Amino acid sequence: MLAKDSATPKGAMVDSRLHPTIDPDGDHDPEYRRTDRLDALARIRPGDEPRPAVGTATVPEDLSAVLRSTPAKLVTLGVLVSILLVVSGIVAAQMVTSRKATHDQLLGTTEPLANAAQDLYSALSVADAAAVTGFISGGIEPEVVRDRYEQAIGEASAQLVAAAGGTTEDADSTRLLSGLAGQLTVYAGLIETARANNRIGNPVGVAYLSEASNLMQTSLLPMAQELHTRGVAAVESTQRAAVRPPWVAIGLLIAALGALCAVHLVISRISRRALNPGLILAIVATGVLLVWMLVAGLVSSSATRRAITHGAEPLATLTESRILAQQSRTAETLLLARRDSTGEYDGAFDETMTRLGDRLHGYSDDNDDRTASTAVTQALAARDAWIASHERTRAALARGDYTAAAILATGPGADEATAQFAAVDRALSDGIDATRAELRSNEARAAQLLSALAPASTALIFVALCGVIIGLWPRLREYQ
């Protein structure tokens, strides 16, 4: 009874519903507990569901609470900003690598091919003019003319080999080079046959010369000019692809930097700490990459633009001018070799010389670059002297003095056509070398500015990602 009195105060009411295992008298009877449980089960009606205990939550409510929690928000911010950093780094590295590869291709393949095609055209034109000059002289051609021809043929062969190195993936250029190589051999054979007949005074030599010259004018030179045109077009398209700054990469880096600054602000408010070293490291790394990308991209684009305006464009003008001068010289020599009385070659000479003057005057008026201004001035002066010499040649032919006309056209005198053509060709060649050097130096500068940026972008983005992890991990541990 003492135990019963101590467990339940005397006179206290005991509710068997709250204590089903205790009988009203306080006796702990196992049989009573079993009967009470059976009665409780019998009172449960169909459709009644047990209610959750006070203070517990269902699984969806728990998940929603977790997603709304501060740690989940921090993880989400970290993942999003990390993805943005990775995408920015990949795009920046790919754009820089592609841009540098474009500059390297232009310097190593595209521009050398265009230059080789221009030199090839020049060598072929000089060879044909020298061969015709030998026939104008009559009998055995002068040794200097023979040496000029052989040197030009050797130069043409060398330029064919040089041009072939840049056409491995260009079927049209390969076709042109194959045609040039095959027909150059045929041309050289015809010239040798014509020379042998001319030495013994056989008139058939002129026929062989005409056939060789026709092959040169209708096949070899047009193919060389087409090859050069394709090379110039490839240079221009390559430069246009590299002249625009990498705006996509720059825009992504700006977005990544802004996102990092926003995350730092959020973390500062949550943690009530003004500075987060990890996130500051990420901001600094991304900012350095952005500034580097801006400076290198803009300076590289500026160098490429200068390569176009001070290199490629004047180079194309000077190269075309040199081709026109060589065409004029060919027309002048054929006028005498074929003793043309129809005016065909005389008209061709006037047309090409007019176009040459237009190109050179246009370069002097429109181009603010002084790289080749001296060469252009010298070429214009030599052109005027050449036209004056040709007028004397034309006058000699008009009065029937073929010997005087031949001397004026092919003689070694300083005031004669040969010397003036050589002066024009030499001045234009110097101008081409100067503008080509300007083009290549600017392209090399543009490529050099981008050389270290691709690996640096990868390294700096990795540093930024580490900074994000370092900045968020301590804050997440505070909630464990």
Image (cartoon, rainbow, N blue to C red):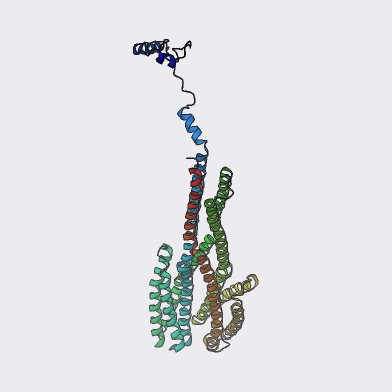
> Residue at (40%, 65%) from the top-left corner?
168
Describe residue 66's horizontal placement relative to residue 268 as left or right. left
Q: Residue at x 47, y 82 (%)?
A: 130
Q: Residue furthest left?
A: 31
> In the rendered view, would you say 422 is above or below 95?
below
Residue 72, position in %: x, y? 50, 39
Residue at the extreme right of the image, as rendered: 365
Residue 202 in percent (x, y) is at 40, 85
Q: Position of residue 480 (x, y in %)?
A: 47, 40
Q: Is residue 392 positioned above or below 114 on the image?
A: below
Looking at the image, residue 42 sits to the left or right of residue 370; the answer is: left
Q: Is residue 47 visible?
A: no
Q: Nearer the viewer, residue 416 or 51?
A: 51
Which image quarter is the N terminus in?
top left
Q: Position of residue 448 (x, y in %)?
A: 50, 67
Q: Nearer the viewer, residue 218 or 91?
A: 91
Q: Is residue 366 visible?
A: yes
Q: Nearer the viewer, residue 287 or 5?
A: 5
User: Is 63 rendered above or below residue 438?
Assistant: above
Q: Nearer the viewer, residue 289 or 123?
A: 289
Numbered label tally:
0
Give left or right: position of 161 versus 358: left
Compared to residue 36, the image places residue 363 above or below, namely below
